[in-house]
Image (tube, rainbow, N blue to C red):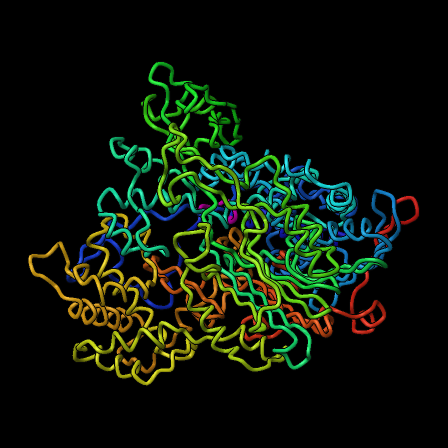
Amino acid sequence: MMLRRSLIRAGETCAFHLRAALARALSRPLPPAPPSAAPPYPGHPGAAYPGAAYPQQQPQQPHPYPPPQVPPHASPPQGLLRSPGFRLPRLRPPRGRWGKVAAAAGALVLLPPVALFGAYLWMRAQQPQTSGSIAIPGGGAPAEVIRDKQGVVHIFAATERDAYRALGYAHAQDRLWQMETMRRAGAGRLAELIGTKYGDFALRTDRLMRTLGIRRAAEAMAATLSPEARAAFDAYAEGVNAYLATRSEALPIEFQLLRHTPEPWTIADSLVWAKLMALQLSANYRDELFRSRLLERLSPQQVDDLFPPDVPGSPATLSSDLRSMDLRDTVRRTLAALPQMGFDTASNEWVLSGGRTTTGKPILANDPHLGLEAPILWYLARIVTPGFTVTGATVPGVPLTILGHNGKVAWGFTTTHSDTQDLFVEKPDPRDPTRYQTPDGSKPFETRAETIAVAGEPSQTLTVRGTRHGPVISDLDAAPAAGNAAGNTNGNAAAPVLALSFPGLSDDDTSAEALYRLNHAGSAEEVRDALRLHVAPQQNIVYADGTGEIGFISAGRVPIRRKGDGRVPAPGWTGEYDWTGFLPYYALPQAVNPPSGQFVNANNAVVGRDYPYRLATEWPDPSRAKRIVEMLGTGRHSVEDVARQQMDIVSLPARDFLPELLKYPTPPGLASDAAALLRGWDGRMDRNRPEPLIFDMWLRELVRAVFADELGPDFASYWELRPDALRHVLNERPDWCDDITTPQKESCADMVGRSLETAVKMLAERHGSNPKSWRWGDDHKVALVHRMLSRLPLIGGRADLSVETDGDFFTVNRGSTTLRDPENPFRHVQGAGFRAVYDLADLDNSRFVIATGQSGNIWSRHWGDLVEMWRDGGSLRLAGDRGRLVSAGAEVLTLTPRDTGTNTK
């Protein structure tokens, strides 16, 4: 008995001190980032570099999810681990001399196995129930959530409402933390969760979202929903809340570490995502600010050299009404106050008519390119009811399928990159700074107070001002004292302010209703009818139906400007630059069944210069679209052909622009050896080859050599691989090649050779002196990491799913990088998080894949089980009836109304 008691005490002691040690480790400030396997690249902004002056490196944005503070005691925070079926025992330290002796002796023997067993129990405690039956609140009929071997949910339900409720439950089981951060980001409540101790990213984001009124706009959008659409959102919220009420597992680790319990889900929480995406995919207002900043130091012609306009002769200078105003301080402060909202966005889509396929029916391909992280944004799901089915990519937090097919039609999206945002310069009334000038006289600013809670600190109050054009965003930098109202003009009440106009902030935004109707469209014509209601962001949609019809439309509201082109802020007090309305639906770019039998878009221009309206003055690089058209040719293609085309890694700039660079004299030595490799290269950005690394580093350094001296501190914001701008300089504007910081006059040949020499020197210092041994994959690794957990000790490795990848910024299989990062300039941070190929001859034969896995729980077997499949071009088929899925090993969870069911496992 004494031995048994001693062992129990020893076990209690081991568990107590193990959990206390874990809490202390998690509460400790983060150590410096470990050094990479190879030394960092030299010559980053601020470092010496022959022949060019560089701006000081801009401070990095604070990490959006810093490590939490956890007090160094072992007992769990109250309310975090509570659930109907989960309790942790109360642990106490040993007492008495013999207790301590027994603890010391037992610890030596039991600590390793107890620690492992405790870790196993801890991980198991966070896994959701995926089989058996669970009784949930609400009426309706039972619904089955069937998870296949990859964790993809197939929901079988008697009604749509039951299906949406089940989807909400499944989303919450697998991605609750992702849903929580998404709704808090849009509502301006991140700082309430993570505070400011490790940086002000959360507070800056909250201030922007509160200023723009994203949550308010989501609530207004909810009022536009039809009864049918609202029922879908309402049922989904019921499902999320049913999970919160009935879960038998502990909350995910992120909630535990931050001592946070989620609030009930609402319809507006789901619609916040639509507003966030509209903002991210329509961020032209940042370009206006940056262009205004450049015009302080460069001529309009020079700015056009940097951003060649699509329309020749487009004005790039400020309006004459603004030339006498000093906007420098307003623009500088606004740019500095804006939070980093993620990486650039892109996508691919194309659709082939039956005459261009081997099946005789259309094939549609789509892969959206957003920021890559773990878990990925997308979640695969399939809903089957007697009268409705839909399959494809959902977003946790949203009941509707964003990209997919419904058994009758298939659709895909790319971002139009049209200019649907304008900044207006407003003049405060010099006699009363609470008012501003309009064409109809002085009017009062609309004001409201927003209280922002900050974890561990007093709340802050932000005074938001509004104008007839929209919210004032130049107040973002007004840093209030804790608990006090913010100032508005940084001490200058007469200073001009900047107001943002954007259709996505309107109260009559019916985009959610449009998506609901798109999910239910039964034909190409019904797709077009649904998209009449889409407001923001403007998207290029390709679609096809079972009859063989294919179509394309750029749907969304595009402003008609009375004057100006939206490239720089416009005077707001005159009325001359106001919007007079929006393009009518019939005037939007659209077509059906073209003679070529195909529509292709990869964010390239959707209209020519003969289009009577202005969508944009600049378009993204067209390389991906050109390559897709090249691969399609005029022949017929199968589903397998199209899937292979999505994985293409030929860079057209590498293939077509590189020969122009190689015409210049090559410096001797290592640079000559590297150039010799490039001369025999086919432009494939293969992770196992050295040429991609040499070429992209050469372009990186050439952009810096040509533009950094003129742009000064603004160069870091411009620094991307820019072959079109370089070609323009080399062929037409060679004055850019002269380094204005030196007394000599450099030629373009000097800069081309010097940049190659510098590039290979950097690579040699990192990878050795033999260019043949260098590999693109050594530097080009996809950043599939959990933004919070990857930074923590003990578990950080589990939260990092990074692997080597092919492709780069210009390839169809996009591998966009962090070019400005001196440590990892080629880290793969943006690309196709979701790929799909739809076979209209047999939609069950369609192919899908996402970049990580279905689960957001790092302990789940579905946390990262799709990474290599995604990287290597594999895919899944989401089809099959219940019996077929079960016989293949799927797990079945039945959600039953509470009055008829009980929880079983």
Q: In the picture, which quadrant includes the C terminus? A: bottom right
Span colored in magenta: 25-29
Question: Which residue is more in the foreground, 47 or 155?
Answer: 155
Q: In the image, residue 829 lies at what x, y percent?
A: 46, 60
Q: Quadrant of residue 719?
A: bottom left
Residue 50 magenta-highlighted:
no
What residue is rendered at 37% in x and 42% in y?
564
Q: Nearer the viewer, residue 775 or 321?
A: 321
Residue most extreme to the top:
431
Q: Is residue 253 left or right of residue 790?
A: right
Is 66 positioned to the left or the right of 585 in the image? left
Q: How many marks?
A: 0
- In-front residue for pair 606/428: 606
Residue 611 appears in the picture as rendered: yes
Q: Residue at the bottom extreme? A: 680
- From what the image shows, is residue 362 above or below residue 897? below
Q: Is residue 661 above or below residue 397?
A: below
Quadrant of the rendered structure where residue 119 is?
A: bottom right
* Prevailing secondary structure of the magenta residues: helix
Q: Residue furthest left?
A: 743
**Visible residue check, residue 6:** no
Q: Position of residue 431 (x, y in %)?
A: 35, 14
Please state which of residues 609 and 97 is positioned toward the viewer in this rendering. Answer: 609
Where does residue 468 sit, x and y in percent of width and height? 48, 28
Q: Quadrant of residue 437?
A: top left
The answer to whether residue 374 is left or right of residue 315 is: right
Q: Residue at x 57, y 52 (%)?
A: 555
Q: Where does residue 861 sit, x and y in percent of width and height?
A: 66, 65
- The residue located at (27%, 79%) in the rendering is 674
